[in-house]
Image (cartoon, rainbow, N blue to C red):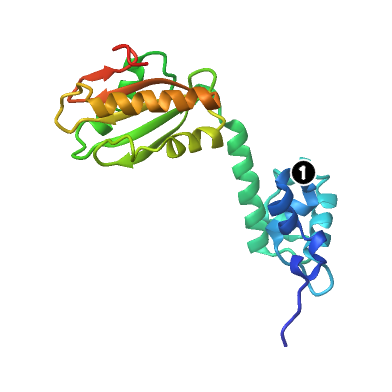
Amino acid sequence: MKVETLSIRDFPKDDRPRERMMNEGPESLSNHELLAILLRTGTKNESALHLANKLLKQFDGLRLLKDATVEEITSIQGIGQAKAVQIMAALELGRRIHQLTYEERYVIRSPKDAADYVMEEMRFLTQEHFVCIYLNTKNQVLQKRTVFIGSLNASIVHPREVFKSALKRSAASLICVHNHPSGDPTPSREDIEVTRRLAECGKLIGIEMLDHIIIGEHKFVSLKEKGYL
């Protein structure tokens, strides 16, 4: 005989944590609602929300739960090993994120720093790769993203694609980099045109384009140093 369980879906839509998270964001949810999402289902007599409340009561909120073992979590009726492991995995991810430090991020203070950051992975590429390096206010790298692969063309390298990640990451500035498979980093007319176009777009939205670096064979050219920015 199948045992029925109460899940989050059994609650009125306005009371469902998953729907509220999607509509209002995770910060709108309480601790027990976030735990209920991890638990997903409850038991025949208790919902996931009720189980989450029991869990927090047992462990004095999140204070002791963060160090709880599988055995301690499964001692609560209705929570098996699978649910306990999910909770522990989520807590461990949170712990690791909290331990991340900005000191681990690469800092770019000069065109050479930017070139060194990508030189070894880009100098042997047989196609042109257009890469954006997004920086915070301390010039620390937030993200490196390949935006386009192929011959550089002002109509193809669209500002929307370049600045989309910058806005998403709340970047203060960016550096564009692309390689010349020939090994000669001398800028072409297209390189200069793309640089000026992106720099103008950056000024409009308040995200400065610091430089455009062209990578060759163990050498590079900074369009900033050449006066094109």
179 left or right, relative to 18: left
Measuring from the top left, give residue 59's x and y in whole percent: 80, 48
Say if residue 119 shows up in the picture.
no
137 versus 35 height, above or below: above
Q: Quadrant of the C terminus?
A: top left
Give me the residue at 72% from left, 58% from top: 19
Q: Secondary structure at mark 1?
A: helix
Please state, as top left, top right, bottom left or bottom right, where the N terminus lies in the image. Answer: bottom right
Q: How many residues crowd around disc 1 within 10 Å: few (fewer than 14), some, or many (20 or more)?
A: some
> In front here: 74 or 156?
156
Where is residue 24? Give x, y as percent. 74, 48
Which residue is found at the position 41% from the left and 14% from the top?
109
Q: Amino acid at mark 1?
A: Leu
Q: Is residue 115 visible?
A: yes
73 in relation to 77, above or below = above
> How many numbered marks are there?
1
Residue 216 location, quadrant: top left
The residue singled out by tag 1 in the image is 62
Q: Residue at x 53, y 28 (%)?
A: 171
Instruction: Give the residue displayed 44% in from the left and 24% down from the top.
Output: 200
Picture coordinates of residue 11, whole percent (x, y): 81, 67
